[in-house]
Image: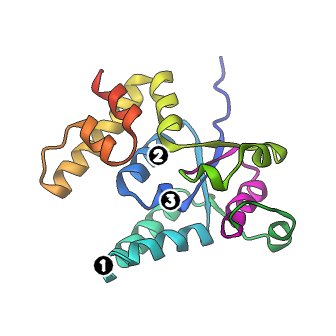
């Protein structure tokens, strides 16, 4: 029996910026649940958001972005301005994300900005929209052991970096992944 090709999914900057969410998503990608995609513009949005935390935030985000580009050298989708010109979304500042998904032959977009990515508009382009909690919860349901390992690694890293004795449920709740946290806590 062969395994189906994992979906190609654009990660919006709003799900790359928060460390725990990013680590959970990319941990799932490393496990082969999906293929992550992004654009230079998405990366720059993430870096600008991190820079608001101070100069060290920008430095850390640029370093992390370089690491991700090295781990997934085919993830970056080149900009297609002509494609952007024909597209419409409620927030024009998000059109580049939709254009990247189309140009990258992606299957969907993971974002927390549901109102800015109406499902009917995405469906016209053959794309789905998923919030990170539901997206990751689906993988947890499909393969609890592998997603449990991802969560264990993220939890260990959070404890090491923060010095706090996080529970998985509390960490996921703080990362706005409450349903995933509840499912992981019940393991």
One can see residue 5 in this view: yes
Q: Secondary structure at mark 2?
A: helix
Please give left or right for residue 1 compared with residue 125 in the image.
left
The x, y position of residue 154, in whole percent, is: 30, 45
Q: Residue at x 68, y 45 (%)?
A: 108
Spatial CA span between label 1 and label 2? 23 Å
Q: Residue at x 31, y 80 (%)?
A: 54
Classify 10 Å Cα crowding around label 2: few (below 14), some (14-19), many (20 and above): many
Q: Which residues are magenta?
A: 92-111
Front position in the image: 46 or 152: 46
Magenta highlight on residue 29:
no
Spatial CA span between label 1 and label 3? 19 Å
Instruction: Please name the residue that numbered disc 2 is placed on.
Output: 25
Q: Residue at x 71, y 68 (%)?
A: 92
Instruction: Please name the residue that numbered disc 1 is placed on.
Output: 56
Q: Is residue 86 above or below residue 183?
A: below
């Amino acid at each position: 029996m062969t395994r189906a090709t994992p979906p190609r999914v654009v990660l919006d900057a709003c799900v790359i910026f928060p460390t725990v969410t990013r680590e959970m998503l990319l941990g799932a990608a490393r496990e082969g649940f999906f293929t992550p995609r992004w654009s230079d513009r998405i990366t720059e949005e993430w870096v600008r958001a991190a820079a608001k935390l101070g100069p060290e935030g920008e430095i850390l985000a640029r370093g992390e972005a370089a690491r991700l580009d090295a781990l997934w050298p085919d993830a970056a989708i080149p900009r297609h301005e002509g494609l952007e010109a024909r597209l419409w979304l409620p927030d024009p500042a998000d059109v580049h994300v939709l254009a990247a998904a189309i140009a990258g032959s992606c299957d969907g977009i993971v974002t927390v900005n549901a109102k800015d990515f109406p499902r009917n508009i995405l469906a016209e382009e053959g794309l789905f929209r998923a919030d990170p909690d539901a997206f990751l919860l689906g993988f947890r349901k499909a393969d609890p052991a592998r997603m449990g390992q991802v969560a264990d690694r993220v939890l260990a890293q959070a404890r090491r970096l923060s010095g706090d004795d996080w529970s998985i449920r509390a960490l996921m709740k703080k990362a706005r992944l409450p349903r995933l946290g509840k499912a992981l806590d019940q393991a």
